[in-house]
Image: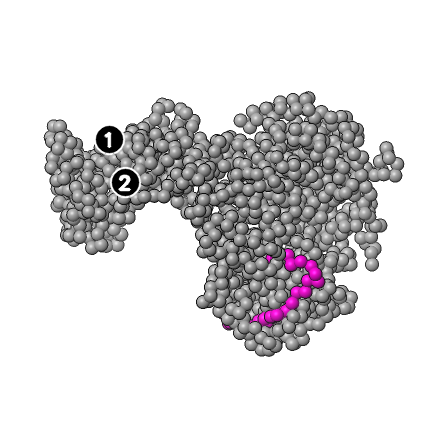
Amino acid sequence: MKHIAPKLLGCFLGLSLALGQSTAAFAAPPSKGTMGFVIRDWFTSVYNSKFNDECPDGLTPSYDEIWWRGISREERAKITQNGLNPPLNRLPYAMRRGPKGENVCLQPDVVKDPPMRVIEGKYSYGANIDGTTDGRATAKTCKHEKFTHPDGTPGIDNQMYRLVGCIYGWRKGGLPEANAHEGRGTSGLGMILVEITGVNDKDPRNSDNVTITFHRSIDQFALDGNGKPLPYSSYNIDTENGKNRYGDKLKGSIKNGVLTTDRGDVRVPYYGGYGFMHPAIKNMALHMEIAEDGATATGQVTGYYNADEFLYWVGGMVGHATTAADCPALHVAARQLADGYPDPKTGECTHLSTAIDIKAYSAFIIHPEQKSASR
Amino acid sequence: MALQLNVIKGLLLSGVVALGFGMAGCSDGEPVAKGAPPTMRRLSNEQYRNVISDIFGPQITVAGQGDNLARADGMIAIGSRMARITPAGFEKFYNLARLISTQVVSPANRDSEFPCTPADPKVADDTCAKQFYAKVGRLLYRRPLTTAELDEAVKAANEGAKTKGSFYAGAAVGLVGMLTSPQFLFIVDETEPDPDHAGQQRLTAYAKAARLSFLLWNSTPTDDLLTAAEKGELHKDSGLEKQVDRMMASSRLDSGVRAFFEDFLRFEQFDTLEKDATIYPAFSLKVTEDAREQVLRTMIDHLITRDADYRELFTTRKTFVTGPLARIYRIPVTRPSGNAWQPYEFPEGDLHAGILTQIGFAAVASHPGRSSPTLRGRAMRESLLCQKVPDPPGDVDFSKFEDSDSPNRTARERLTAHRSMEACAGCHKITDPIGLGLENLDGAAQQRTTENGAVIDTSGDLDGIQFKDAVGLGKAFHDHPATANCVVDRLATYAFARVPRTEDKAYVTYLQKSFANDGYRFAPLLKRIALSDAFTAVAPAKTEQAQLETKP
Amino acid sequence: MSILLPRKIPRRTALRGMLNGAAVTLGIPFLDCFLDNKGKALAATGQSLPVRFGTWYWGMGHTPGHAITEKAKSGVGIDFLKETASLKPFEKQINFFGNFGMPLDGRSNYTHFTGWVGSRTGSIPQRQGDIPATTIDLLIADEIGNDTRFKVIDASSTGLPRDNYSARSAESRAETEVSAIALYARLFGPDFVDPNSGNFKPDPNIMLEKSVLSGFSGVSKAYLAKLGASDRERMDEYFTSIRQLEIQMSKRLEKPEPNVACLKPQPPKEAQVDKIAAAREMPNVIETHKVMAKLLAMAVACDQTRVFNMSFTDANGNVRRPGESSTHHLLTHAELVDPALGYQPQTFWFNTQCSEGFATYLETLSSIKEGDGTLLDNCLIMATSETNYAKVHTIDGIPIYLAGKAGGRMKTGMHVVGSGDPLTRIGLTAMKIMGVQAQSWGTKSMQTSKPLSEIMV
């Protein structure tokens, strides 16, 4: 995670209060004890060193590379019309390389690929989620290796990073998530609202006891002329049969503008790679630094991501070349690396610890039943 | 929703008429009208659009416009009677006329536009052409056409039909002629001898109809009104009042009231308003459009729908917003996308109260990338209080107080330095103290409490009325006697298209007193002007013998 | 009521309309001085090349001491400094006029207004907004602009329609074209007759439309008699405008001579040039100007007009850089002079852009070959601003350029020193070069009857 250290922020609102100024500027919305944000950026947090030290053997080979290696020179010539067809045209062949022409992303068990390369480095962003110092197995976790945060904090859990960190498409700025980000920006799908209630009206940046509720919005992002999100827009909560479709809650507090929460299971909407889902992030916590002017916030979501949901998303993604992942190997590795929520029958873990970098914009959250709003 | 509002408005208005401003003629103390020379006003672009839409229907696109009228003596209405049509300006009207005429005679529209069907659509048809031009010509020229005018149009249509092999194409040719004629483009006050006052002139009934119609609806007289004129009803008090009441009860009164306030508040500034996208990313073109509409909606709602005190426009927290505006005001709306207008009342504690704090004022009277207490102060004084602020002297070195690296972090500090220069002090003392009252609103009218890290002090006084912040400033405007007097003065100026002269002073004073007695309600004021003798009184034109062809 | 038909505007009527308020005295009867054409013969057709007049406007003057080295007396050679370095390649096609004065006769200097009005009309405004006389371009257009499709064409790259420094009075100030696309449509749209297209056929509809125009603009004598004197004048100007449109229509009925210099340009792309939301951001101003300059130059080459006005930036300095809170105008006042550089750095940047804009304009005109020279050689371009040093709004020493050789009628490459003489001497000279038989120009202390003979051939 980008280093989020609590720092002494000059409290803008407190200052104006002290001087007897009108507090209207940024204080109006928290007057009902609430603050709202809409999450715009949602990227798996990856630590990339300058010389790829975390992947000492290089990045993991992509699925079409593996396929290419496995066929003869004659077959190559035939499929590519003597090399005239561009690589993208090879994709359907590369995907359908099961013994009976099965799509190996949808049926990853039909072939056995060489193991993929995973992160071997020491550092990762994220949080200590299991509470152990050594990653030993607990009732809710499986044995795994810990990372150290680049800021020196030990005990970091981030098996998702370990899994995807050496895949080309998940390096920083990698296409699958960049595309997903783009898609969210224009589709209005997968928009997460963060509503903070119990905010101290007199000093919203220091509120001991707040509740954080996660909703989905059905309104489009409000963007400026350059396509950047605008703060202070209003978003209606998505409902189903009149009831909030999401709405999971966490407890937390705000200190000097930094929001931290306890952990709990939270279902959030997710859209990307032309697919929509609502993963439940287990044992999730939100850490968010609210900018002094209250307009934006940056932070990190940590918790356990369901490995099947992740694999399903990758498998269903159109245009696998952008991910450069090899589905059969990814499935094997994901199960091996999963560190959370053992299956009661098999004892094998089903979830991957993860960290997600977010950026959010101040928003008014409109409740359907109240027709009132909060920010 | 709109329908509902109109119904409510209708009820309110009829109620008001019954209760309050049902005045018979002008017998309630109106000073004797002196009259002024007749005017010849060029149609404004808005009037042009309204007229075309009223006569030919909203399906006719008016794609373009003539040159915008220039402001003279503070009002565009005065500019309209001085405006000239330059070659480039005429070319625009001509092209517009061609576009409109083509649409009017198009197969899609001709059935509804023509009162008749030609015997053979491929050849000229005198009878049908005559019927068509008589119908539209009366509305375009605001009076029945003369025989010669009608003949000219039919002649053009016939020639056109012959050249183009189509009755309708020919009819379009004559229509282009009408739409580019001086009778259409200029609203001329035609006069006739006054039978009640020997030796004096009066406006013809048709000219009166045009004055009423452009004042109240900002468009050409309707068939009803022209018929009333034809019957001589507009020369009688009762007939006149009947027409004015009818027009004021119509939802089209909105157009007339909007037109006045667009002129009064110098809305042409919106046409070239530009905000820096990096500094104010939320300020889009849509915001500019909506900000303009917001002011007008607030005014129509306050002054017409709710028939409320004009002065409360400066304090009211009630307004209407869209998603783009809400992002600037930082307020919640239930329909953030699209063009949905929704009523909104700013809560206590919010500094947005009254029209001074709306984007349509505070951001317009600002620079592209920052606020300007001086521009705001000047706009408040000149537009809203009718006070004149002198132009800045020509030889001032501004560096000392405008340097952004100087220790003067807030506008107040910079302008205090400014006022320390004698040459500047005189005017800046007039503009800045009130302009600084809005400093909690930045150049886009977004709320803020600090500038460059320093807390902004918005206290000040307006001609002795103390205030602490923007809300207090609005209250000070509410209480300032010039606020109400100014709008009366400007409405009279607008209606007469001239600056009130010395001999009009008694009339304006009379209007101002009546305005106060009527609880500062706008509709009664408008009605009083529409019914007054002064509105239609004419003095002889400053003519010489017409010498157009003979002057050496 | 009878109608005056047909409405052929008598020459005198038209003339009176045109010269409304002009502070110019004509030496010989108007008709006698018509078309004194000294242009060179174009071998291909035997046609003579007309000499054209253009103005170019930029706001906020320049930085004294950093634009052009001052001189004690007139002479050949202009010493372009850093701010005007981009004009150096055009030294031989330019005259620069320094240290000319604008005596106010006790009237106020209405900042950002008096300067442009005085330099373009030869008269000092009585109040803000007052344009007391006809601007020089229209005086010249009345002389040379009667035989082309358009008498004058105005364009501005700032997106401000009122940003037109051409007018007959405050009330008779046409809006300038601010959209390059609209400018293209006006010049090269369906009404443009390409002189080089082989198959010219006069459109019969034009005759019809023309006769209708004349017919409908007729109003009765009785109607006119009732109008006040000033309203009659306004009506008169309206008739003059119709006459102008009739001329435009007549031109479309004539088969134009082939013209090798004329190449109908491609329409500009919308996204490129019509950025209304940020029209006054310098990159957009520069882009729009570039496109408009090309259109104007080609309109002139195609003889659609012989008088053309371009304003690059406006007299109130509303232009700005993206992301900056201060406009050019605010900077001229607010910015401190950098002691090391000796000027206001940001203001200097804008001023430099203006010089570059003018260089682009001249480059565009000279890129079109005409006869054995360029279009610029057959033009006289007068470039003015409203102030000398914007920081303190000085109006003495307003920088003025005359560029182009006016078909061989003007000597160039000179720095002409005014020694405080009224700047109307420059305009009078330009008028004489363009064939206006003016004996004097200007009013009160601005009146002069002394042209600058040193630049006249």
Q: Is residue A273 magenta?
A: no
- The magenta stretch is C85-112
C103 relative to A201 in the view: left or right: right
Q: Which chain's residue wears label 2?
A: A
Report whether A156 appears left or right of B16: left
Circle 2 SS class: strand
Question: Crowdedness of circle 2 by 10 Å Cα count: few (<14), some, many (20+)?
Answer: many
Please tell me if label 2 and label 1 are on a single chain: yes
Give the SS element for disc 1.
strand
Instruction: Please tell me whether residue C235 is drawn above or below residue B487 in the rendered image.
Output: below
Q: Quadrant of the C terminus of chain B?
A: bottom right
Residue A101 % position (x, y): 18, 40
Q: Nearer the viewer, residue C357 or B458?
A: B458
Amino acid at circle 1: Gly
The x, y position of residue B384, in whole percent, is 62, 41
**Image quadrant where residue A292 sits:** top left
Foreground: B447 or C404? B447
Q: Residue at x 88, y 36 (%)?
A: B198
Q: How many numbered badges does the structure rendering display?
A: 2
Residue type marked 2: Gln
Identify the chain of the residue marked 1, using the numbered disc in the image: A
Tag 2 residue = A300
N-terminal label among 2 and 1: 1
- Tell me if B455 is positioned left or right of B14 in this view: left
Residue A264's label in the rendered image is 1
Q: Is residue C109 magenta?
A: yes
